Structures are given as structure tokens and as C-alpha cells.
Image: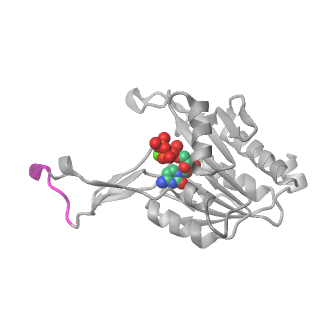
Amino acid sequence: FSPLVSERPLAGRHVIVTSGPTHEPIDPVRYIANRSSGRQGHAIAAACARAGARVTLVSGPVDLSDPPGCEVVSVQTAEEMRAEVEKALPADIAIFVAAVADYRAARIAEQKTKKSEGGLTKLKLTENPDILASIARHENQRPALVVGFAAETRDVEVYAEEKRVRKGADLIVANDVSHDSGIGGKGGVMGGTRNRVAIASADGVEKWPEMTKDEVAERLVLAIAARLGV
Ligand code: CTP
Ligand code: CA
């Protein structure tokens, strides 16, 4: 048995996890999204539940079954995700794994935009709220431990530490997705079952070897428990 199951280091804790992409509608048939299968986020939610936590999983659209032992709240957009995360507070730990779309359409067209009208070439975008940063800087309900993810294609460790400080997170789990171009269909981190990550904290950057997403989840939960001093 893993120490998660035998020692239940997160017993009595409430954990919020975000997972999957968000879909930002443009019109009734189109949306803006990032690439994300939700596998790593769902694996982390499942590992937290195995470790004894009460887990609220706020997930964008994914093609995965609900992880055992988690309360799953399904959302479409970043704005809905932010509202559901707020609603789930207070929490001891918040882990932001979702690949949130950075932008949404400034206005959603009620009717399908016709190509012949050239509508989408002039699409106006608005920046989405940064959910991680808003929770990490929450005025009265900041979770004791706030964890973010960073998918980068270059200078992974530099960007991870910069993101950690900029967003006010305690930990950033960074992965290199430089081989994940959908062009040519080469399999990579996104949609795959394996991951290689580096963990940025105030103590520096720690590189973990490549392992499965379930193993990353398990090891991350143990690292989180150790930080909370349980
Ligand atoms: N995140 C979030 N809300 C957003 C954007 C990102 O909560 N609107 C969270 C993600 O879930 C992740 C972390 O912030 O944990 C980093 O996301 P990332 O896209 O790497 O960071 P950005 O600040 O959007 O920077 P970039 O320009 O590299 O996309
Ligand atoms: Ca982003």
C-alpha cells in the first residue's frame, strides 16, 4: 500500500482542485480553449481523496470519469470556474491544474458568425480573471497552501519561479510541453499518461524524474502533506 492510503496524511483537510480546459464561447458553434485532457488534475484530485481529504474538483469539459471520492463541479468558462472555486472556500489546500483560457470573446455572438461576413478576423478578446492569483491573494480566506501549474515550452524553471512569485503561490509544478505540438500528432505530456515536472518553491527548484501522472499526483500529495507538517 502507498503511504497515502495507509497514513491518510490529508485526513480532515479540504482540498480544491481545478482541472481540464475552459471553453470560452465565441458564438453558438465556436469556442476558445487551451489543450488539456484533465488527466493530471483528475489524478491529483483522486490522490488527495485517497490521502483522506475532502476534495472539491472544479473541472472544465473533459472526457474522463469522475475520480472516486471527490465532489465534482463541472464548468465551461473561466468565469464560472472562478465563481465555483470561490464558493468552495474555505479550503486548506488549493491546487490549480486547469489550463484556463487566457482570453474570452469580448462579446458572444447570439447567431453563428458567417465566414462570408469576415466576422472572426476582427474578433475582440478580453483577458480572463487569473483564478490562481486571486485565491493566492485572497484577503481573508487564503488556503494555507496554494499550488499552481505551469506548462512551458522553454526556460521551464525560470518561468516557473517567476510565475510562483508573480501569482503569490507557494509551489509551482512546471512541465515542459515543448514536444506537445499537435502538428504532426506527436504524443507528449498533453493527453498522454506520463509527465516530467520540476517543483518551484521558496527553497529553489527541484527536478523530478519522468513518471506517470498518477505517480506525479501521489508524490505531489506527499510533498504537500510534508509542507503542512502532517
Ligand atoms: N491560471 C488560473 N487562471 C487563469 C490562468 C492561469 O488559475 N486565468 C492558473 C493555472 O491553472 C496554472 C497557473 O495559473 O496553475 C499558470 O497558468 P499559465 O497559463 O502557465 O500562466 P499564465 O499566467 O496564464 O501565463 P502564460 O502567459 O504563460 O500563459
Ligand atoms: Ca495561460
Q: Residue at x 20, y 60 (%)?
A: 112
Residue 137 position within the rendered picture, expressed as x and y whole percent measured from the top left = 61, 60
Main secondary structure found in the magenta portion: loop
Please give left or right for residue 54 compared with residue 179 in the image.
right
Q: Residue at x 67, y 64 (%)?
A: 142
Please give left or right for residue 26 compared with residue 229 in the image.
left
Q: Residue at x 76, y 49 (%)?
A: 221
Between residue 55 and residue 131, name the one nearer to us. Answer: 131
Among all residues in the image, which is located at the extreme bottom? 87
Between residue 193 and residue 210, name the one nearer to us. Answer: 210
Between residue 115 and residue 108, name the one nearer to us. Answer: 108
Among all residues in the image, which is located at the extreme left? 116
Between residue 32 and residue 87, name the one nearer to us. Answer: 87
Question: Image quadrant for the C terminus?
Answer: bottom right
Q: Is residue 97 visible?
A: no
Range shown magenta: 111-118
Q: In the rendered view, tell whether residue 125 sits above or below residue 200.
A: below
Please give left or right for residue 148 compared with residue 6 in the image.
left
Residue 47 position within the rendered picture, expressed as x and y whole percent measured from the top left = 74, 52
Residue 102 position within the rendered picture, expressed as x and y whole percent measured from the top left = 42, 50
Q: Is residue 225 visible?
A: yes
Indicate the quadrant where residue 161 lies: top right
Q: Residue at x 77, y 49 (%)?
A: 224
Residue 167 position within the rendered picture, expressed as x and y whole percent measured from the top left = 58, 50
Q: Check the image and tell me how it is coloured.
A: one colour
Q: How many marks?
A: 0
Please give left or right for residue 1 compared with residue 166 in the image.
right
Indicate the quadrant where residue 26 lies: bottom left
Whether the magenta-drawn stretch holds residue 65 is answered as no
Among all residues in the image, which is located at the extreme right? 7
